[in-house]
């Protein structure tokens, strides 16, 4: 009888187990995600925390917004699952997953889209905008990943709504990075020269 009573509890606990790999797959950042030999993951944490904590800095700036969204997509795969970041406290994984469920509909990104092509497309759009090539930016954000098409996606990037769950996730990541720096953790400092964080 006790075994039968325990089955629903075990089922609930099983549903709470974090998978070994991100549901949207791993992602890496392109070489131009950070200037010089800096650490791309650190730069992404600090940049997204500032951008989404101060959304006015992204208003009317779809190129910067595209990079911020791409960096968030990367962090949602890296921080909860990359071995380099296992020292982070708090619900990093659930918070970033929750933020992703807020962010993707706001931009018009398909909920089941793999993270890597999302990151690549958003960075390509950002480069095109900065080069003054609106048509190329729209092409970068077309296709099944961006459900509203390129022009509408650019409009959304230029006019992001409030994203409190995204802001909360990135703020916690920045706080944890600062805590690790103060503790002298090697995970929070230094650079690996690439966008794959601490994954082998």
Image: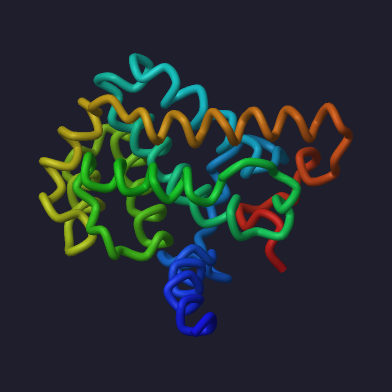
Q: Judge from the rendering whether residue 88 lies leftward or rightward of residue 180; answer left or right.
A: left
Q: Total of numbered circles in the picture?
A: 0
Query: What x and y, as percent, mark residue 199?
Result: 68, 63
**Residue 165 image position (x, y, % from top left):** 38, 34
Side of 190 relative to 104 (left or right): right
Q: Position of residue 186 (x, y in %)?
A: 85, 44
Say above or below: 52 vs 79.
above
Q: Is residue 36 above or below residue 14?
A: above
Tell me how the rendering is colored.
Answer: rainbow
The C terminus appears in which quarter of the rendering? bottom right
Q: Observer-nearest residue: 175 or 149?
A: 175
Q: Residue at x 51, y 34 (%)?
A: 170
Extreme-right residue of the structure: 184
Q: Is 139 in front, or is 94?
A: 94
Residue 149 in the figure: left or right of residue 99: left
Give percent across and percent down for residue 37: 72, 40
Residue at the image point whose x is 46% and y is 83% from the top: 4
In the image, what residue occupies the spot 57% across and 32% down?
172
Residue at image position (51%, 56%) is 77
167 up-or-down from 12: above or below: above
Say left or right for 190 vs 4: right
Residue lying at the far front in this picture: please name it: 1
């Amino acid at each position: 009888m006790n075994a039968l009573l325990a089955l629903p509890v075990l089922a609930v606990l099983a549903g709470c187990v974090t998978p070994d790999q991100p549901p949207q797959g791993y992602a890496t950042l392109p070489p131009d995600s950070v200037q010089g030999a800096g650490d791309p993951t650190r730069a992404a944490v600090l940049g997204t925390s500032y951008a989404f904590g101060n959304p006015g800095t992204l208003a009317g700036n779809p190129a910067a917004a595209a990079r911020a969204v791409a960096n968030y997509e990367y962090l949602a795969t890296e921080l909860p699952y990359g071995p380099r970041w296992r020292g982070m406290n708090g619900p990093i994984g659930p918070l970033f997953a929750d933020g992703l469920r807020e962010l993707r509909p706001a931009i018009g990104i398909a909920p089941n889209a793999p993270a890597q092509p999302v990151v690549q497309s958003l960075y390509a759009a950002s480069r095109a905008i900065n080069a003054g090539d609106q048509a190329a930016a729209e092409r970068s954000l077309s296709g099944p990943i961006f459900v509203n098409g390129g022009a509408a996606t650019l409009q959304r990037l230029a006019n992001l709504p409030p994203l409190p769950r995204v802001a909360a996730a990135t703020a916690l990541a920045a706080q944890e990075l600062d805590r690790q720096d103060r503790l002298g953790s090697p995970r929070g400092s230094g650079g690996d020269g690439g966008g794959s964080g601490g994954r082998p």
